[in-house]
Amino acid sequence: MAKERATRKKKATKPCRAKKADGGQCSRTASAGSTYCVGHRCTVHLAKPCPYRRVQGTHLCKKHGGREAIAKNHALKKKTPSTKTKPKTDSKKTRVDTWLKALEERMGRLPGDYKRFVRERDFSRIPGPDGVSFDAMEPTPYGSGVLEFFLDPNPKQMGYFDEVDMLVIGSNGFDYPTCMSLRKGDRGGIYYHDHQQRSLWDDGQFRMMFPNLAPGIEKYLSQRRSGKLPAKPEGLESFYRIAANFSEFLERCEPMESDE
């Protein structure tokens, strides 16, 4: 009996056969029924534990599919695209779409040509590096309008003339806004707002402020004196129609050249 106990004890302390990565012997004790320790033997346990060594990188021996598991893992890695190669989401376009959705919830449906333009966000031609100028479809007391930048369609930042249903879509360094009409029967029309309200100035104030008046302004004053200015809708006395829609507005824009 004492001999049997000694034999069992000897078997229980049998060292693991596995070699370490540096070539040294594994210092752990082999599992019962195996010549390898828990860390090196196959994990398959049927009627008894599998006695064979696991394939590195798996929990299985060659007999129980360790090699196949490694091959399958390699195949999955090749099929799965790296995060570096995944197409990047256009965060700016997503943000613009979110803004447009919120804006339409407040203002109603916006013209398709305007939405396409701001989604593309290509401002290299209009307004370009130096801005654009444009003439109105009616006589004005300011000459030509100027646009130097478009506003992002963020409803929290865009200006709005509530009393006349005008949405501010762009402006310039002197804060003269370019607006889009949301009025019934004129929705999508583009207007330029003269915030100085020069239509209320008398001739003397014009000549005091601008000694060398542009021909267009001289013509405006002449038509006003003779009562030939076209009638304007109530509330739009300082809004001047530029185009019937956004696409027509883009066609009427002329690039401005830098003074440098």
Image: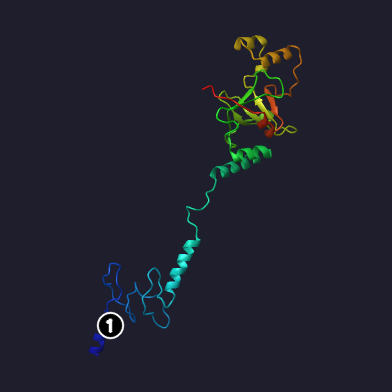
Which residue occupies 30% across, 67% down?
21
In the rendered image, the vertical position of residue 110 relative to residue 5, given as above or below: above
SS for callout 1: helix
Q: Is 165 or 81 nearer to us in this picture?
A: 81
In the rendered image, the vertical position of residue 242 relative to residue 30, given as above or below: above
* Residue that numbered label 1 is attached to: 11
In the rendered image, the vertical position of residue 81 relative to residue 127, given as above or below: below
Splitting the image into 4 quarters, where does residue 40 fall?
bottom left
Give residue 210's position: percent from left, percent from top: 61, 12
Label 1: few (<14), some or many (≥20) within 10 Å?
A: some
Give residue 20's position: percent from left, percent from top: 29, 69
Splitting the image into 4 quarters, where does residue 22 fall?
bottom left
Which residue occupies 47% across, 62% down?
77
Applied colour scheme: rainbow
Does residue 107 show up? no
Splitting the image into 4 quarters, where does residue 194 fall?
top right
In-image side of 216 versus 129 (left or right): right
Give residue 62's position: percent from left, percent from top: 41, 76
Of the residues shown, which amino acid type is indicated by label 1? Lys
- Which image quadrant: the N terminus? bottom left
Which residue occupies 73% across, 14% down?
223
Does residue 250 show up? yes
In the rendered image, the vertical position of residue 118 relative to residue 239, given as above or below: below
Which residue occupies 67% across, 10% down?
203
Residue that extends furthest to the bottom in the rendered view of this protein: 1
Give residue 57's position: percent from left, percent from top: 39, 68
In-image side of 15 versus 228 (left or right): left
